[in-house]
Amino acid sequence: MEQNKSVLIVFGGLPGSGKTTLAKALANHLSVVYLRIDTIEQLLPKTGSGLGPEGYLIANAIARENLKPGNIVIVDSVNPIPVTREMWEKTASETNSKLIGIEVKCSDPEIHRQRVENRIADIPGHQLPTWDQVINREYDAWESKDFSIETAHETVESSFKELLLSLSNINRTGQA
């Protein structure tokens, strides 16, 4: 029996960094499964304590089902803390899938703030975070990522080209 050739590509980064733009572009380019945590969480009932891990749990279950037959799955999420990253690692391991972690960053605070403040929700009813919520959000360093894409002074097109180049380098060498 042939070994599973599934790939789990997990995008992470703060809101407004450009991760959704790049994740969607890659999913469209490759014609693969695209899972967005914001879409899942928007459909979950809201509680007084805010959102918990449910969106990530649901997305992991859907990813697992799509990875089992050998598909490529792209996940678009903030992926802010080790526990969320470990969930993806476990899903990849359980499905014998290659995991590629991509962190999207916008290191220029002025550009990042402008993006956050000028975004328009593309999910019905989605309440986008404010700049204060973005900069005060818990987000731990992502040591295990395969590579980062810096979007601050780049066009979407140049960031996407960098993304494709980094992915092709992983395919050739096994690492970024």
Image (spheres, rainbow, N blue to C red):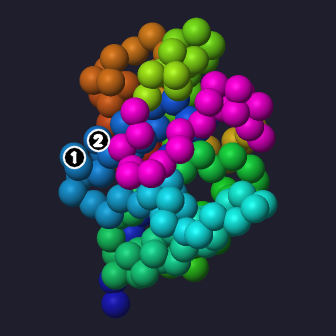
**176 lies above or below 10:** above
Secondary structure mainly formed by the magenta segment: loop
Question: Is 36 colored magenta in this rendering?
Answer: no
Q: Residue at x 57, y 79 (%)?
A: 94
Q: Residue at x 75, y 62 (%)?
A: 48
From what the image shows, is residue 17 above or below residue 35? above
Q: Is residue 91 left or right of residue 70?
A: right
Which mark is on residue 25? Answer: 2
Q: Which residue is mark 1?
A: 29
Task: Pinpoint residue 102: horizontal percent, then vertical percent.
Answer: 52, 42
| 136 versus 77 height, above or below | above
Q: Is residue 131 magenta?
A: yes
Q: Secondary structure at mark 1?
A: helix
Residue range highlighted in magenta: 120-138
Tell me the amino acid under the disc marked 1.
His
Q: At 48% across and 48% down in the image, what residue appears?
A: 126
